[in-house]
């Protein structure tokens, strides 16, 4: 019997925990679940005329989202959620300049709080948004204490 060459691969902790939870429901280890997801993704990507291709075209704006089937729309939504998670994970909220929110409606605090509570976002994105909300509260508190001291 031939031996398989194995390579060590690091995964995001949240993804690994999700795989472990889903794997236990499917009678798989976390590793087996990650391998299953990888094989499934590879098989879907290989299908040129598959719904994945139509979803890709919708993501690129080549076809309208309204033209997707219900299953394609679900895949589209999942792809958008992943892109949001990736964008939030890569964002550097601490170094971003704080805009002047005095003339903006609605209140940015409630917008961030609303985003952080949405179930469609991944756990990592919700955590990053909650961190941004905490940072915003600290900056606003500092601004208010600075104005009160004048």
Image (cartoon, grey):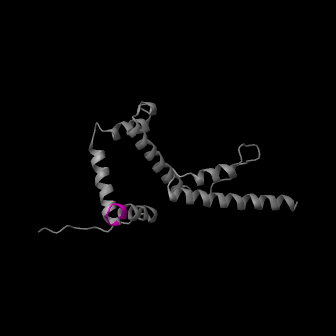
What segment carries the magenta color?
24-29
Magenta region includes residue 25: yes
Compared across the picture, whether 12 is left or right of 89 comes to left
Residue at 33%, 67% (x, y): give it: 29
The residue closer to the viewer here, 143 or 70, is 70
Residue at 76%, 43% (x, y): give it: 103
Residue at 38%, 60% (x, y): give it: 22
Up-down relation of residue 57 to residue 143 (above or below):
above
Q: Position of residue 118 (x, y in %)?
A: 56, 51
Q: Is residue 94 visible?
A: no
Residue found at the far right of this picture: 150
Compared across the picture, whether 102 is left or right of 14 comes to right
Q: Is residue 126 visible?
A: yes
Magenta region includes residue 78: no
Compared across the picture, whether 95 is left or right of 85 comes to right
Residue at 39%, 36% (x, y): give it: 57
The residue closer to the viewer here, 9 or 33, is 33
Q: Quadrant of the C terminus?
A: bottom right
């Amino acid at each position: 019997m031939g031996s398989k060459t194995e390579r060590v691969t690091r995964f995001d902790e949240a993804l690994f925990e999700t795989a472990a939870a889903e794997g236990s429901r499917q009678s798989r280890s976390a590793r087996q679940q990650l391998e299953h997801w990888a094989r499934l993704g590879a098989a879907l990507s290989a299908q040129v005329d598959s719904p994945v291709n139509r979803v890709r075209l919708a993501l690129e704006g080549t076809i309208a989202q309204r033209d997707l089937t219900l299953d394609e729309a679900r895949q589209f939504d999942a792809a958008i959620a992943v892109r949001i998670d990736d964008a939030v994970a890569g964002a550097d909220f601490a170094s971003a300049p704080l805009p002047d929110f005095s003339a903006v409606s609605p209140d940015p605090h409630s917008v961030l709080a609303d985003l952080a509570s949405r179930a469609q976002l991944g756990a990592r994105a919700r955590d990053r948004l909650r961190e941004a909300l905490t940072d915003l509260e600290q900056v606003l508190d500092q601004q208010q204490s600075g104005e009160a001291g004048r």
